[in-house]
Amino acid sequence: MPELRGGPDRTLRTVQGSVRVLSVLDLWFHGTVRDSVGSVAVTFRILPEGPEADLEEIKARIEKALDTSLRGIEEKPVGFGIKAIVAVAIVDDASGAMERLEGALMGIPGVSSVDTEDVTLV
């Protein structure tokens, strides 16, 4: 920073100190600063009990279990004729919200396992 350099001895010039201490109470924030819980997008991977499982019936039950939080649902091949169901839901980032949904999905007949693949802030 050449503008701070002094004369030929190259000493630094004095810099003005702080004018006053700023309290956090004096600040105004524009935008989101609040105590409320945010939302997250959760991607669940649901595996059926076997290749003979009725995926359409399982998807209908998933739609009923996730209700308004469901944002997308699709089938993806896993292997050996088994297809996984991938569902994306938007939920509050409150403690236990994802576990409750995962438990509801595990209670669906024909479902072998439920894994949470991804959690992203919305």
Image: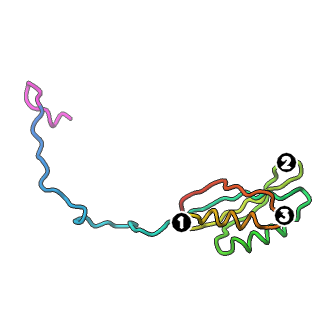
* Stretch in magenta: 1-11
Residue 54 vs residue 12: left or right? right
Tag 3 or tag 1, which sits nearer the N-term? 1
- Relative to 11, say whether 26 is above or below: below
| Marks 1/2: CA–CA distance | 35 Å
Q: Are marks 1 and 3 in contact (CB under 8 Å)?
A: no
Q: Compare residues 35 and 82 and report the one nearer the observer.
A: 35
- Relative to 1, say whether 46 is above or below: below
Question: Label 1 belongs to which residue?
Answer: 94
Disc 3 residue type? Answer: Gly
The outermost residue toward the right is: 52
Question: Residue 79: which numbered mark, if any?
Answer: 2
**Relative image position of residue 50 (x, y in whole percent):** 88, 56
**Disc 3 residue crowd, few under 14, some 14–19, many 20+, Cα 10 Å:** some
Residue 121 vs residue 77: left or right? left
Local secondary structure at mark 3: loop
- Between label 1 and label 2, give the one nearer the viewer: 1
Quarter-of-image position of residue 63: bottom right
**Disc 1 residue crowd, few under 14, some 14–19, many 20+, Cα 10 Å:** few
**Relative image position of residue 23 (x, y in whole percent):** 21, 61
Q: Residue at x 65, y 75 (%)?
A: 68
Quarter-of-image position of residue 65: bottom right
Residue 6 vs residue 121: left or right? left
Q: Compare residues 2 and 32 and report the one nearer the observer.
A: 32
Disc 2 residue type? Answer: Gly
Q: What secondary structure prevails in the magenta region? A: loop
Question: Label 3 belongs to which residue?
Answer: 110
